[in-house]
Image: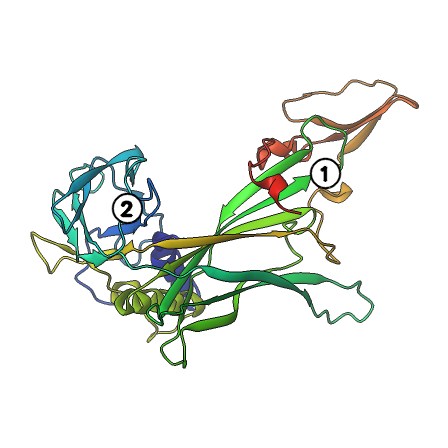
Amino acid sequence: MKQIKEKVFIIFIILLGSCISQFIPETKESQEILVVEGLLTDQRGSGIIKLSSSLPLGTISNAIPVSGSIVTISDDMGTYFQLFETEPGTYVSQSYIRGVIGRFYTLHIKTNTPSFNKSFNYESLPMEMKPVPPIDNIYYEKVTIPDNNKYALPKEGCQIYLDTHDPSNQCKFYRWEYDETWEFRLPYTVPNNICWVSANSDKINVKSTTALAEARIVKYPLNFISNTTDRLKIKYSALVKQYSLNEDEYLYWEKLKSLSEQVGGLYDLIPSSVSGNLFCTYDPSLKVLGYFSVSAVSSSRIFIKDNFAGIVNPYNADACVADTIFDGGFIPNLNTTTWVIVDNFMPSYKVITYSKECADCTVRGTNQEPYFWRYGK
């Protein structure tokens, strides 16, 4: 999930940076504001809540995790379960806990931490766990990337699409996330030259079918992968997750999406205008940013192993090769600031680099193959 703190703060910084002179509106929001990222699904151990504090408008800095809070989730049957802080500001449910379709869930937060400098109680509105239909199909098409230079070699990207529908015509608001994994290889004779790297989706993907005759989505453009990344060079996979939203949450994500796609102007949306479903029980006038999402989830995985023209190679000679040492010459600072990427015996020479990333793929990823990797073609 695109993290809410990125959408609410980093984008606002971009909006400010796009102006010739910084405009800071008059506001009473001079204090820190609690930011909540929350999701509960029907999968075991799915409850994850992230708490952070915003900074006053006009302050350019990262949000600060809010630690030491008491975080619980209750349902409409009177059951409470506690979440545990696994890292600063991140609270996770126990593995056996899962949501049940048709029940209503409420998030409860009691902040009590010097970093937030507040001790308040917060709650969400009761949220119904809605069912979600399966994903019908995930597929891709090659896309030729235009180049103004008519003599340039061709370049290709990849557009990933999604189809889904709800035969009951009840699910009319959708949201999608995806987790990417791709294999990359160093073109040098080093011990760790095959690795995998993973990333979470960094886009807000939402769609409504209320204006359509039926709840069917065809060829939704989920993600475009350009040739400026090496994701498509060897093999790529994405696990796509589909959620069902109510109309209020859909409008919330739509506003954040609009905010993320605007370069900025004086009358554009600002973060404080994107209200969620949380409030402070002590003082309802205190603003809380973020949303506690509750939904069943369906998922599907796509594998892509194809040839794409013009994919970049971040480990080419210009980026990696620093020097060539002949006949066993002395190499200063070996394996500290200098690494060998080619070791040839006949004739005897070594090629060195000053970038450890060129000599060890685990700097960027992991050399442990994902469990699902061999399932794909």
Say which quarter of the image contains residue 93.
top left
For residue 262, side relative to residue 36 (left or right):
right
Q: Nearer the viewer, residue 163 or 329?
A: 163
Q: Position of residue 99 (x, y in %)?
A: 27, 48
Return the disc, 1 or 2, that comes first in the chain's sequence.
Answer: 2
Q: Which residue is mark 2?
A: 52
Q: Is residue 338 above or below residue 166?
A: above
Do the residues bearing badges 1 and 2 touch, measured as CB atoms within 8 Å? no
Q: Which residue is mark 1?
A: 320
For residue 15, side relative to residue 273 (left or right):
right
Q: Position of residue 78 (x, y in %)?
A: 11, 46
Q: Nearer the viewer, residue 117 or 238?
A: 238
Q: Is residue 62 above or below residue 357?
A: below
User: Mark 1 or mark 2: which is in front?
Assistant: 2
Q: Position of residue 146 (x, y in %)?
A: 70, 70
Q: What's the amino acid at mark 2?
A: Ser
**Can you see residue 23?**
no
Say which quarter of the image contains residue 245.
bottom left
Q: CA distance from mark 1 to mark 2?
A: 39 Å
